[in-house]
Amino acid sequence: MTREAILEWKGREYDHNPKSADWYWALGIIAVAGTIAAILFGSYLIAMLIVIATVSIALHAAKQPPLHRFRLVEQGIVIGDELHPFARMTSFSVLEDIEGTLPPMISIKTDSWLSPHLVIPLEGVDVDMVYAYFLHHVDEEAHHHTFVDLVAAWLRF
């Protein structure tokens, strides 16, 4: 079944903020302190979890986000090769930066437990056309930043 694209664009999932050596040192110091405290209290599982989480955070901080291909099709939106149908979307909202330094994004909430919240950059595409097409298929609702979004922004992810 071929899906004819109404609109097509490319974008990154998030902006990459290179971390300084000081950032990695701070992460390491916090991890070592937490690991030592967990070992002193006899929580070896927590100590192991701290080490694994630290390695995961450091690897994620160092990698450049991949360039994704987005296609708006009649059934929904395709990210890479994965279709997210309009039928599984509960609401959407177009997010625009007041200062104009960041590209507009579309926030989509779905009933999928694997990807319940999609945030897609709309750089290089007609935002009004995307908005009108989504408005025709999905309910619009105000979306707010979650606690995880705020922590990620604070950590410069």
Image (spheres, rainbow, N blue to C red):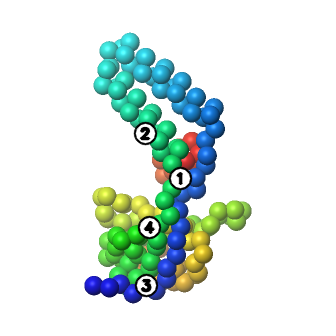
Residue under circle 4? 108
* Tag nearer the camera, 1 or 2: 1
Mark count: 4
The quarter of the image holding the N terminus is: bottom left
The percent position of residue 157, horizontal first and vertical second, equals 55, 47
Kind of residue at disc 3 = Ala
Q: Between marks 4 and 1, how big is the CA–CA gap?
A: 23 Å
Secondary structure of the residue carrying tag 1 is: loop
Which of the 4 image quadrants contains residue 47?
top left
Q: Between marks 3 and 1, how big is the CA–CA gap?
A: 27 Å
Residue under circle 1? 64
The percent position of residue 131, horizontal first and vertical second, equals 52, 79
Label ID, residue 138 = none
From what the image shows, is residue 50 above or below residue 80? above
Callout 2: few (<14), some (14-19), or many (20+) C-alpha neighbours within 10 Å? few
Callout 1: few (<14), some (14-19), or many (20+) C-alpha neighbours within 10 Å? few
The residue depicted at 58 percent of the width and 56 percent of the height is 15
Sequence order check: which comes first, mark 3 or mark 2? Answer: 3
The percent position of residue 13, horizontal first and vertical second, equals 50, 60
Label ID, residue 56 = 2
Q: Are marks 3 and 4 in contact (CB under 8 Å)?
A: no
Sequence order check: which comes first, mark 2 or mark 4? Answer: 2
